[in-house]
Image (cartoon, rainbow, N blue to C red):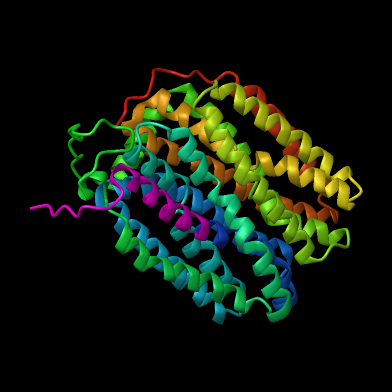
Amino acid sequence: MQIVQTRKFGQRYAFVVVGLVFTCLLAAAGLRSAPGVLLLPWIAAFHWNRGVISLAIAIGIFLFGLMGPFAAALMLSFGVRRVLVTALALMALSTGASFFMDTAWELILTWGIFSGLASGCIAMTLGATIVNRWFTTHRGLVMGLLSASTSTGTLAFLPLLALIAQHGGWRPVVLTVAGISAALIPLVLWLLPERPADAGLVPYGTAPGTIPPALALPQNPIKNAIGTLIRASRNRNFWLLFGTFFVCGLTTNGLVGTHLIALCGDHGLSEVHAASLLAIMGAFDLIGTTGSGWLTDRYDSRILLFIYYGIRGLSLIYLPYSDFSIQSLGIFSVLYGLDWIATVPPTLKLTNQVFGDRDAPIIFGWIAAGHQLGAACAALFAGLIRQIEGQYLQAFVIAGGMALVAALFSLTIARGRPAIAA
Protein backbone atom coordinates (compact mmCIF):
# COMPACT_ATOMS: atom_id res chain seq x y z
CA MET A 1 0.00 0.00 0.00
CA GLN A 2 1.42 3.38 -1.04
CA ILE A 3 1.50 6.10 1.64
CA VAL A 4 0.72 9.57 0.28
CA GLN A 5 2.39 12.39 2.22
CA THR A 6 0.53 15.60 1.45
CA ARG A 7 2.77 18.64 0.91
CA LYS A 8 2.05 22.33 1.39
CA PHE A 9 1.69 24.82 -1.49
CA GLY A 10 -0.40 22.51 -3.71
CA GLN A 11 0.87 22.31 -7.29
CA ARG A 12 3.38 25.03 -6.47
CA TYR A 13 5.29 22.44 -4.46
CA ALA A 14 6.82 21.59 -7.84
CA PHE A 15 8.93 24.73 -7.41
CA VAL A 16 10.20 23.47 -4.03
CA VAL A 17 11.37 20.36 -5.87
CA VAL A 18 12.98 22.55 -8.54
CA GLY A 19 14.80 24.55 -5.85
CA LEU A 20 16.15 21.40 -4.20
CA VAL A 21 17.23 19.81 -7.49
CA PHE A 22 18.78 23.15 -8.56
CA THR A 23 20.90 23.07 -5.39
CA CYS A 24 22.02 19.48 -6.02
CA LEU A 25 22.89 20.29 -9.62
CA LEU A 26 24.79 23.32 -8.35
CA ALA A 27 26.87 21.11 -6.04
CA ALA A 28 27.66 18.67 -8.86
CA ALA A 29 28.63 21.60 -11.08
CA GLY A 30 30.92 22.86 -8.34
CA LEU A 31 32.61 19.46 -8.13
CA ARG A 32 33.10 19.27 -11.90
CA SER A 33 34.49 22.81 -12.10
CA ALA A 34 36.85 22.43 -9.11
CA PRO A 35 39.69 20.79 -11.14
CA GLY A 36 39.98 24.05 -13.07
CA VAL A 37 41.06 25.67 -9.81
CA LEU A 38 43.09 22.69 -8.62
CA LEU A 39 45.11 22.10 -11.81
CA LEU A 40 47.94 24.52 -10.97
CA PRO A 41 48.07 23.66 -7.22
CA TRP A 42 48.32 19.95 -8.12
CA ILE A 43 51.19 20.70 -10.48
CA ALA A 44 52.96 22.65 -7.75
CA ALA A 45 52.31 20.02 -5.03
CA PHE A 46 53.06 16.81 -6.93
CA HIS A 47 55.04 17.96 -10.00
CA TRP A 48 52.69 15.99 -12.26
CA ASN A 49 52.69 17.22 -15.84
CA ARG A 50 49.68 18.98 -17.30
CA GLY A 51 48.87 16.07 -19.60
CA VAL A 52 48.44 13.57 -16.72
CA ILE A 53 46.16 15.91 -14.78
CA SER A 54 44.20 16.72 -17.94
CA LEU A 55 43.72 12.97 -18.47
CA ALA A 56 42.19 12.57 -15.00
CA ILE A 57 39.92 15.56 -15.60
CA ALA A 58 38.94 14.22 -19.02
CA ILE A 59 38.02 10.80 -17.56
CA GLY A 60 35.84 12.51 -14.96
CA ILE A 61 34.09 14.63 -17.57
CA PHE A 62 33.59 11.66 -19.91
CA LEU A 63 32.08 9.44 -17.20
CA PHE A 64 29.97 12.40 -16.03
CA GLY A 65 28.39 12.41 -19.48
CA LEU A 66 28.33 8.66 -20.05
CA MET A 67 26.34 8.11 -16.87
CA GLY A 68 23.51 10.35 -18.13
CA PRO A 69 21.37 7.78 -19.98
CA PHE A 70 22.07 5.08 -17.40
CA ALA A 71 21.18 7.50 -14.60
CA ALA A 72 17.87 8.26 -16.32
CA ALA A 73 17.18 4.53 -16.64
CA LEU A 74 18.18 3.95 -13.00
CA MET A 75 15.75 6.68 -11.94
CA LEU A 76 12.95 4.92 -13.82
CA SER A 77 13.83 1.56 -12.21
CA PHE A 78 14.80 2.52 -8.65
CA GLY A 79 13.51 6.05 -8.16
CA VAL A 80 14.94 9.54 -8.38
CA ARG A 81 15.45 9.93 -4.63
CA ARG A 82 17.46 6.71 -4.19
CA VAL A 83 19.70 7.48 -7.14
CA LEU A 84 20.23 11.08 -6.02
CA VAL A 85 21.12 10.16 -2.43
CA THR A 86 23.53 7.43 -3.57
CA ALA A 87 25.21 9.82 -6.01
CA LEU A 88 25.65 12.56 -3.38
CA ALA A 89 27.17 10.05 -0.96
CA LEU A 90 29.64 8.80 -3.60
CA MET A 91 30.55 12.40 -4.52
CA ALA A 92 31.35 13.14 -0.88
CA LEU A 93 33.36 9.93 -0.39
CA SER A 94 35.38 10.14 -3.62
CA THR A 95 36.37 13.79 -3.28
CA GLY A 96 37.02 13.41 0.45
CA ALA A 97 39.26 10.39 -0.17
CA SER A 98 41.44 12.44 -2.51
CA PHE A 99 42.61 14.36 0.58
CA PHE A 100 44.99 11.44 1.21
CA MET A 101 46.26 10.90 -2.37
CA ASP A 102 49.91 11.22 -3.35
CA THR A 103 50.08 9.39 -6.70
CA ALA A 104 48.60 10.13 -10.11
CA TRP A 105 46.56 6.89 -10.23
CA GLU A 106 44.77 7.98 -7.05
CA LEU A 107 43.90 11.27 -8.75
CA ILE A 108 42.46 9.34 -11.70
CA LEU A 109 40.52 7.03 -9.36
CA THR A 110 39.00 9.76 -7.16
CA TRP A 111 38.57 12.81 -9.39
CA GLY A 112 38.36 10.78 -12.60
CA ILE A 113 36.40 7.56 -12.18
CA PHE A 114 34.35 7.75 -8.97
CA SER A 115 33.51 11.45 -8.97
CA GLY A 116 32.67 11.22 -12.68
CA LEU A 117 30.24 8.33 -12.14
CA ALA A 118 28.64 10.02 -9.12
CA SER A 119 28.25 13.51 -10.55
CA GLY A 120 26.96 12.00 -13.79
CA CYS A 121 23.80 11.01 -11.92
CA ILE A 122 23.28 14.66 -10.95
CA ALA A 123 23.34 16.30 -14.34
CA MET A 124 21.09 17.44 -17.17
CA THR A 125 19.20 14.14 -17.30
CA LEU A 126 18.11 14.67 -13.68
CA GLY A 127 16.77 18.08 -14.69
CA ALA A 128 14.99 16.59 -17.71
CA THR A 129 13.42 13.85 -15.57
CA ILE A 130 12.18 16.34 -12.96
CA VAL A 131 10.78 18.69 -15.61
CA ASN A 132 8.91 15.89 -17.41
CA ARG A 133 7.49 14.50 -14.14
CA TRP A 134 6.53 17.68 -12.35
CA PHE A 135 5.50 20.08 -15.17
CA THR A 136 3.19 20.05 -18.17
CA THR A 137 3.59 23.79 -18.87
CA HIS A 138 6.59 26.18 -18.77
CA ARG A 139 8.96 23.28 -19.35
CA GLY A 140 11.45 25.32 -21.34
CA LEU A 141 11.66 28.00 -18.68
CA VAL A 142 12.13 25.49 -15.84
CA MET A 143 14.71 23.49 -17.78
CA GLY A 144 16.53 26.73 -18.50
CA LEU A 145 16.59 27.51 -14.80
CA LEU A 146 17.87 24.03 -13.89
CA SER A 147 20.46 24.18 -16.66
CA ALA A 148 21.65 27.49 -15.27
CA SER A 149 22.66 25.65 -12.10
CA THR A 150 25.90 24.76 -13.88
CA SER A 151 26.80 28.40 -14.30
CA THR A 152 25.56 29.24 -10.82
CA GLY A 153 27.80 26.49 -9.47
CA THR A 154 30.68 28.24 -11.20
CA LEU A 155 29.51 31.58 -9.81
CA ALA A 156 29.15 30.26 -6.26
CA PHE A 157 32.15 27.96 -6.01
CA LEU A 158 35.06 28.97 -8.22
CA PRO A 159 36.04 32.30 -6.61
CA LEU A 160 35.66 30.74 -3.15
CA LEU A 161 37.59 27.61 -4.09
CA ALA A 162 40.32 29.68 -5.77
CA LEU A 163 40.65 31.80 -2.63
CA ILE A 164 40.84 28.69 -0.42
CA ALA A 165 43.43 27.12 -2.72
CA GLN A 166 45.51 30.29 -2.77
CA HIS A 167 45.67 30.54 1.04
CA GLY A 168 45.35 26.92 2.19
CA GLY A 169 46.41 24.75 -0.73
CA TRP A 170 44.37 22.11 -2.52
CA ARG A 171 43.37 19.90 0.43
CA PRO A 172 40.88 22.33 2.03
CA VAL A 173 39.24 22.64 -1.40
CA VAL A 174 38.44 18.93 -1.65
CA LEU A 175 37.10 18.90 1.92
CA THR A 176 34.81 21.82 1.07
CA VAL A 177 33.38 20.03 -1.97
CA ALA A 178 32.93 16.78 -0.02
CA GLY A 179 31.20 18.54 2.88
CA ILE A 180 28.70 20.33 0.65
CA SER A 181 27.79 17.08 -1.10
CA ALA A 182 27.21 15.26 2.20
CA ALA A 183 25.11 18.10 3.63
CA LEU A 184 22.55 17.79 0.83
CA ILE A 185 21.65 14.15 1.56
CA PRO A 186 19.23 14.78 4.48
CA LEU A 187 17.52 17.58 2.50
CA VAL A 188 16.81 15.21 -0.39
CA LEU A 189 15.39 12.58 1.97
CA TRP A 190 13.15 15.18 3.60
CA LEU A 191 11.91 17.30 0.72
CA LEU A 192 11.87 15.19 -2.47
CA PRO A 193 8.81 13.00 -3.20
CA GLU A 194 9.37 10.45 -5.93
CA ARG A 195 6.48 11.75 -8.05
CA PRO A 196 3.73 14.39 -7.69
CA ALA A 197 1.22 11.61 -6.88
CA ASP A 198 3.30 10.67 -3.82
CA ALA A 199 2.51 14.11 -2.43
CA GLY A 200 -1.17 13.95 -3.43
CA LEU A 201 -0.51 16.26 -6.38
CA VAL A 202 -0.62 16.36 -10.17
CA PRO A 203 2.13 17.96 -12.31
CA TYR A 204 2.20 21.75 -12.40
CA GLY A 205 -0.04 23.01 -15.19
CA THR A 206 -2.29 19.93 -15.12
CA ALA A 207 -5.97 20.42 -14.35
CA PRO A 208 -6.85 19.42 -10.75
CA GLY A 209 -8.52 16.03 -10.58
CA THR A 210 -6.65 14.70 -13.60
CA ILE A 211 -5.76 11.06 -13.16
CA PRO A 212 -1.99 10.66 -13.39
CA PRO A 213 -0.64 8.18 -15.92
CA ALA A 214 0.10 4.68 -14.70
CA LEU A 215 3.63 4.18 -13.45
CA ALA A 216 5.93 2.27 -15.76
CA LEU A 217 6.96 -1.18 -14.56
CA PRO A 218 10.59 -1.37 -13.41
CA GLN A 219 12.94 -2.46 -16.18
CA ASN A 220 16.54 -3.53 -16.37
CA PRO A 221 18.19 -0.06 -16.48
CA ILE A 222 21.11 -1.14 -18.66
CA LYS A 223 18.86 -2.95 -21.14
CA ASN A 224 16.45 0.01 -21.17
CA ALA A 225 19.23 2.56 -21.79
CA ILE A 226 20.89 0.52 -24.55
CA GLY A 227 17.57 -0.39 -26.20
CA THR A 228 16.49 3.24 -26.27
CA LEU A 229 19.83 4.21 -27.84
CA ILE A 230 19.42 1.59 -30.57
CA ARG A 231 15.96 2.92 -31.44
CA ALA A 232 17.12 6.54 -31.40
CA SER A 233 20.23 5.85 -33.49
CA ARG A 234 18.05 5.00 -36.48
CA ASN A 235 16.86 8.61 -36.57
CA ARG A 236 19.20 11.14 -38.24
CA ASN A 237 17.96 13.85 -35.87
CA PHE A 238 19.52 11.96 -32.96
CA TRP A 239 22.95 12.25 -34.57
CA LEU A 240 22.43 15.94 -35.35
CA LEU A 241 21.45 16.63 -31.74
CA PHE A 242 24.30 14.42 -30.46
CA GLY A 243 26.86 16.09 -32.72
CA THR A 244 25.88 19.67 -31.96
CA PHE A 245 25.79 18.92 -28.23
CA PHE A 246 29.23 17.30 -28.56
CA VAL A 247 30.46 20.69 -29.77
CA CYS A 248 28.61 22.38 -26.91
CA GLY A 249 30.60 20.37 -24.36
CA LEU A 250 33.83 20.80 -26.28
CA THR A 251 33.48 24.58 -26.25
CA THR A 252 32.31 25.03 -22.62
CA ASN A 253 33.35 23.04 -19.56
CA GLY A 254 35.91 20.97 -21.47
CA LEU A 255 37.87 23.92 -22.85
CA VAL A 256 36.94 27.12 -21.05
CA GLY A 257 35.88 25.56 -17.75
CA THR A 258 39.05 23.47 -17.49
CA HIS A 259 41.74 25.62 -19.14
CA LEU A 260 40.69 29.28 -18.92
CA ILE A 261 42.42 29.80 -15.56
CA ALA A 262 45.61 28.23 -16.93
CA LEU A 263 45.32 30.32 -20.13
CA CYS A 264 45.01 33.49 -18.06
CA GLY A 265 48.00 32.34 -16.00
CA ASP A 266 50.02 32.23 -19.23
CA HIS A 267 49.22 35.93 -19.62
CA GLY A 268 50.13 36.91 -16.06
CA LEU A 269 46.70 36.84 -14.41
CA SER A 270 46.32 35.33 -10.93
CA GLU A 271 44.12 32.30 -10.24
CA VAL A 272 41.65 34.37 -8.21
CA HIS A 273 41.40 36.98 -10.99
CA ALA A 274 40.88 34.28 -13.61
CA ALA A 275 38.30 32.48 -11.46
CA SER A 276 36.42 35.77 -11.13
CA LEU A 277 36.08 35.81 -14.92
CA LEU A 278 34.41 32.40 -14.77
CA ALA A 279 32.18 33.76 -12.02
CA ILE A 280 31.16 36.66 -14.27
CA MET A 281 30.34 34.14 -17.00
CA GLY A 282 28.30 32.21 -14.47
CA ALA A 283 26.33 35.29 -13.47
CA PHE A 284 25.50 36.16 -17.07
CA ASP A 285 24.74 32.55 -17.96
CA LEU A 286 22.18 32.42 -15.16
CA ILE A 287 20.44 35.20 -17.07
CA GLY A 288 21.18 33.80 -20.53
CA THR A 289 20.12 30.20 -19.91
CA THR A 290 16.95 31.13 -18.01
CA GLY A 291 16.14 33.58 -20.80
CA SER A 292 16.85 30.85 -23.33
CA GLY A 293 14.23 28.70 -21.63
CA TRP A 294 11.69 31.52 -21.96
CA LEU A 295 12.59 31.94 -25.64
CA THR A 296 12.41 28.18 -26.21
CA ASP A 297 8.77 28.15 -25.10
CA ARG A 298 8.01 30.72 -27.82
CA TYR A 299 10.40 30.42 -30.81
CA ASP A 300 11.95 27.86 -33.15
CA SER A 301 14.64 25.99 -31.22
CA ARG A 302 16.72 25.47 -34.37
CA ILE A 303 17.08 29.21 -34.94
CA LEU A 304 18.03 29.71 -31.30
CA LEU A 305 20.74 27.04 -31.54
CA PHE A 306 22.09 28.65 -34.72
CA ILE A 307 22.44 31.98 -32.91
CA TYR A 308 23.95 30.48 -29.75
CA TYR A 309 26.61 28.40 -31.48
CA GLY A 310 27.46 31.24 -33.85
CA ILE A 311 28.09 33.72 -31.02
CA ARG A 312 30.10 31.12 -29.11
CA GLY A 313 32.33 30.31 -32.06
CA LEU A 314 33.16 33.95 -32.74
CA SER A 315 33.87 34.55 -29.03
CA LEU A 316 36.33 31.65 -28.80
CA ILE A 317 38.22 32.71 -31.92
CA TYR A 318 38.42 36.26 -30.57
CA LEU A 319 39.79 35.39 -27.10
CA PRO A 320 43.37 34.20 -27.85
CA TYR A 321 43.91 37.21 -30.16
CA SER A 322 42.76 39.71 -27.53
CA ASP A 323 45.18 41.67 -25.37
CA PHE A 324 43.80 40.14 -22.13
CA SER A 325 43.05 43.59 -20.77
CA ILE A 326 40.17 44.20 -18.38
CA GLN A 327 38.07 45.54 -21.26
CA SER A 328 38.67 42.63 -23.68
CA LEU A 329 38.22 39.96 -21.02
CA GLY A 330 35.09 41.72 -19.81
CA ILE A 331 33.59 41.66 -23.32
CA PHE A 332 34.41 37.97 -23.68
CA SER A 333 33.01 37.10 -20.24
CA VAL A 334 29.68 38.80 -20.93
CA LEU A 335 29.18 37.42 -24.46
CA TYR A 336 30.38 33.94 -23.60
CA GLY A 337 28.55 33.93 -20.28
CA LEU A 338 25.17 34.70 -21.82
CA ASP A 339 25.74 31.78 -24.19
CA TRP A 340 27.47 29.24 -21.90
CA ILE A 341 24.75 26.56 -21.81
CA ALA A 342 21.85 28.42 -23.34
CA THR A 343 21.77 25.50 -25.79
CA VAL A 344 20.22 23.11 -23.24
CA PRO A 345 16.53 24.18 -23.27
CA PRO A 346 16.16 24.19 -27.09
CA THR A 347 18.07 20.89 -27.34
CA LEU A 348 15.75 19.24 -24.79
CA LYS A 349 12.66 20.66 -26.50
CA LEU A 350 13.78 19.27 -29.86
CA THR A 351 14.45 15.91 -28.19
CA ASN A 352 10.93 15.87 -26.72
CA GLN A 353 9.42 16.88 -30.05
CA VAL A 354 11.25 14.25 -32.07
CA PHE A 355 11.12 11.31 -29.63
CA GLY A 356 8.21 12.00 -27.25
CA ASP A 357 8.19 12.40 -23.48
CA ARG A 358 8.44 8.67 -22.65
CA ASP A 359 11.85 8.11 -24.25
CA ALA A 360 13.10 11.70 -24.17
CA PRO A 361 14.85 11.63 -20.73
CA ILE A 362 16.97 8.60 -21.66
CA ILE A 363 17.63 9.82 -25.22
CA PHE A 364 18.54 13.24 -23.86
CA GLY A 365 20.90 11.37 -21.53
CA TRP A 366 22.69 9.92 -24.55
CA ILE A 367 22.75 13.34 -26.21
CA ALA A 368 24.17 14.79 -22.98
CA ALA A 369 26.78 12.00 -23.08
CA GLY A 370 27.85 13.51 -26.40
CA HIS A 371 28.18 16.85 -24.61
CA GLN A 372 30.53 15.38 -22.02
CA LEU A 373 32.44 13.34 -24.60
CA GLY A 374 33.17 16.61 -26.38
CA ALA A 375 34.14 18.19 -23.07
CA ALA A 376 36.49 15.31 -22.25
CA CYS A 377 38.15 15.58 -25.67
CA ALA A 378 38.68 19.32 -25.19
CA ALA A 379 40.01 18.92 -21.64
CA LEU A 380 42.55 16.32 -22.80
CA PHE A 381 43.63 17.72 -26.16
CA ALA A 382 43.83 21.35 -25.06
CA GLY A 383 46.14 20.22 -22.26
CA LEU A 384 48.25 18.23 -24.73
CA ILE A 385 48.39 21.15 -27.20
CA ARG A 386 49.56 23.43 -24.39
CA GLN A 387 52.14 20.83 -23.35
CA ILE A 388 53.48 20.43 -26.91
CA GLU A 389 53.08 23.92 -28.40
CA GLY A 390 53.52 25.98 -25.25
CA GLN A 391 50.27 27.91 -25.90
CA TYR A 392 46.51 27.44 -26.15
CA LEU A 393 45.95 29.40 -29.39
CA GLN A 394 45.25 26.42 -31.67
CA ALA A 395 42.87 24.81 -29.18
CA PHE A 396 40.64 27.89 -28.96
CA VAL A 397 40.61 28.60 -32.70
CA ILE A 398 39.73 24.99 -33.57
CA ALA A 399 36.95 24.95 -30.97
CA GLY A 400 35.56 28.23 -32.32
CA GLY A 401 35.51 26.86 -35.85
CA MET A 402 33.65 23.74 -34.72
CA ALA A 403 31.03 25.90 -33.01
CA LEU A 404 30.38 27.75 -36.28
CA VAL A 405 29.91 24.40 -38.05
CA ALA A 406 27.49 23.29 -35.31
CA ALA A 407 25.49 26.49 -35.86
CA LEU A 408 24.89 25.50 -39.48
CA PHE A 409 23.98 21.89 -38.65
CA SER A 410 21.45 23.10 -36.06
CA LEU A 411 19.28 24.46 -38.86
CA THR A 412 18.92 20.96 -40.40
CA ILE A 413 17.32 19.33 -37.32
CA ALA A 414 13.68 18.37 -37.87
CA ARG A 415 11.27 19.32 -35.10
CA GLY A 416 9.25 16.11 -35.47
CA ARG A 417 5.86 15.56 -33.92
CA PRO A 418 4.64 17.51 -30.90
CA ALA A 419 5.60 16.09 -27.53
CA ILE A 420 2.95 14.21 -25.55
CA ALA A 421 2.63 15.30 -21.96
CA ALA A 422 3.65 12.70 -19.44
**Residue beneath the point at 83% across and 46% down:** 393
Is residue 121 at least partly visible in the picture?
no
Magenta stretch in the rendered image = 1-27
**Is 378 within the magenta?**
no
Q: Is residue 11 magenta?
A: yes
Determine the main secondary structure of the stretch shown in magenta.
Answer: helix
Horizontal arrangement in the rendering, residue 123 relative to residue 327 (left or right) = left
Tell me which corner region of the image, top left, top right, bottom left or bottom right, holds residue 5.
bottom left
Can residue 19 be seen?
A: yes
Q: Is residue 399 left or right of residue 62?
A: right
Give me the residue at 39% from left, 40% from top: 131
Query: Picture coordinates of residue 68 (x, y %)?
Result: 43, 47
Q: Name the outermost residue toward the right.
A: 323
Residue 29's place in the image compared with 129, above or below, is below
- Residue 112, percent across and down? 54, 62
- Residue 328, how many percent across, how many down? 86, 46
In the rendered image, residue 75, in percent from the top left (x then y), is placed at 31, 49
Query: Which is more toward the observer, 161 or 200?
Result: 200
The quarter of the picture where residue 422 lies is top left
Q: Residue at x 43, y 70 (%)?
A: 183
Q: Is residue 118 above or below residue 297?
A: below
Q: Is residue 387 left or right of residue 289?
A: right
The image quadrant that residue 49 belongs to is bottom right
Image position of 101 (left or right of 199): right
Q: Please tell me which residue is depicted at 60% across the width and 50% down the height of the picture.
A: 151
Count the numbered circles shown.
Answer: 0
Residue placed furthest toward the left: 1
